[in-house]
């Protein structure tokens, strides 16, 4: 794992002794996702899994005592070697990560996975809240005043 | 108190991270904070306001100086969340590795 200094990014890297197609299936087939998403002592319900651009995903983990955790997001793009989606966790609602999972076929039956998770940035926030001038929120405010 | 979302946003800017780093050495006025940067006092003031809103920095009551101080507990909360997320993701990929092994057999 590396945490880059100039932005808010966590990078995970793994090499699996499995072909790229199998790794891709493990991310995109509900019955396979259910077998690795949650810890062994939690139940997972893959409520929604639409692995295509614009599709949603929603997984619910339930602990033995009934405590539920919801993970959800939207797929931006889904290709055999790259899946880009947002990630939000109910325990920390409002923090939306942009996660890019890259699958590299190493040519010998192994696959290198790289997962880059980017946390919300100041630039994005400035654009939303009108911290800078001319932000979307400023324009919305101006529009509302004109109505 | 700032929420975690605004804390992440506040920390995403290099000037604001430098301001935080400076404040770990002790409180400082806006003028003192602005010294190392090639940007205006007004710009620094704006950055400090973002840090205040995120709950990372408080300003003193002294009307003249209004020194800025760090609230380290707000930083700790963010660090805890990133660490918890990192650990959960690592464990998840451990399980994926096991699954891929099972599928193969």
Image: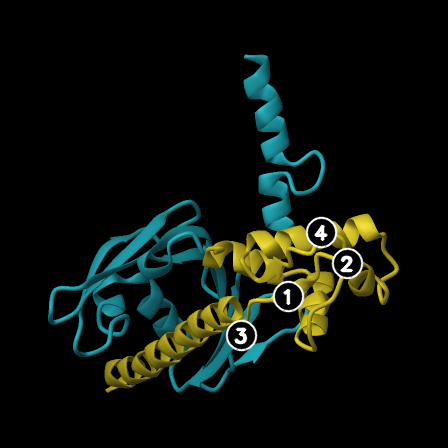
Chain colours: A cyan, B yellow
Residues at discs 2 and 4 in contact (Cβ within 8 Å): no
The vertical placement of A29 against B40, above or below, is below
Closest to the camera, between mark 3 and mark 4, is: 4
Badge 3 crowding class, 10 Å Cα cut-off, few under 14, some 14 to 19, many 20 or more, is: some
A33 on left or right of A116: left
Residue B96, image x and y in percent? 32, 78
Closest to the camera, between mark 1 and mark 3, is: 1
N-term mark: 2 or 4: 2
Does label 2 lie on the same chain as label 1?
Answer: yes
The vertical placement of B44 against A144, above or below, is below
Alpha carbon distance from label 3 to label 2: 35 Å
N-term mark: 4 or 1: 4
Q: Secondary structure at mark 2?
A: helix
Q: Is residue A105 visible?
A: yes
Does label 2 lie on the same chain as label 3?
Answer: no
Alpha carbon distance from label 4 to label 1: 15 Å
Chain letter for mark 4: B
Q: Which mark is residue B30?
A: 2
Closest to the camera, between mark 2 and mark 4, is: 4
Give A52 or A19, whichever is nearer the viewer: A52
Alpha carbon distance from label 3 to label 4: 45 Å
Q: Which mark is residue A11?
A: 3
Q: Is residue A102 visible?
A: no
A56 on left or right of A5: left
Residue B7, image x and y in percent? 54, 59
Residues at discs 3 and 2 in contact (Cβ within 8 Å): no
Chain letter for mark 3: A
């Amino acid at each position: 794992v590396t945490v880059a200094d100039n932005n808010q990014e966590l990078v995970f890297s793994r090499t699996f002794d499995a072909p790229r197609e199998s790794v891709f299936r493990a991310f995109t087939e509900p019955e396979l996702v259910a077998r690795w998403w949650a810890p062994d002592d939690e139940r997972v319900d893959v409520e929604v899994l639409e692995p295509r651009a614009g599709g949603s995903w929603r997984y619910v983990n339930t602990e033995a005592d009934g405590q539920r955790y919801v993970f959800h997001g939207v797929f931006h793009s889904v290709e055999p070697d790259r899946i880009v989606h947002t990630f939000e966790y109910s325990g920390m609602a409002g923090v939306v990560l942009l996660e890019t999972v890259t699958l590299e076929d190493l040519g010998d039956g192994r696959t290198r996975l790289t997962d880059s998770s980017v946390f919300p940035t100041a630039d994005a926030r400035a654009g939303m809240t009108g911290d800078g001038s001319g932000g979307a929120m400023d324009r919305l405010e101006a529009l509302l005043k004109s109505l | 108190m700032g929420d975690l979302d605004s804390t992440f946003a506040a920390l995403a800017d290099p000037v604001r991270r430098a301001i935080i780093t400076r404040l770990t050495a002790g409180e400082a006025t806006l003028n003192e904070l602005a010294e190392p940067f090639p940007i205006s006092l007004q710009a620094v003031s704006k950055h400090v306001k973002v840090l205040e809103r995120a709950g990372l920095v408080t300003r003193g009551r002294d009307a003249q100086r209004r020194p800025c101080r760090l609230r380290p507990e707000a930083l700790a909360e963010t660090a805890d969340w990133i660490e918890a997320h990192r650990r959960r993701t690592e464990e998840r990929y451990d399980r994926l590795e096991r699954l891929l092994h099972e599928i193969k057999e």
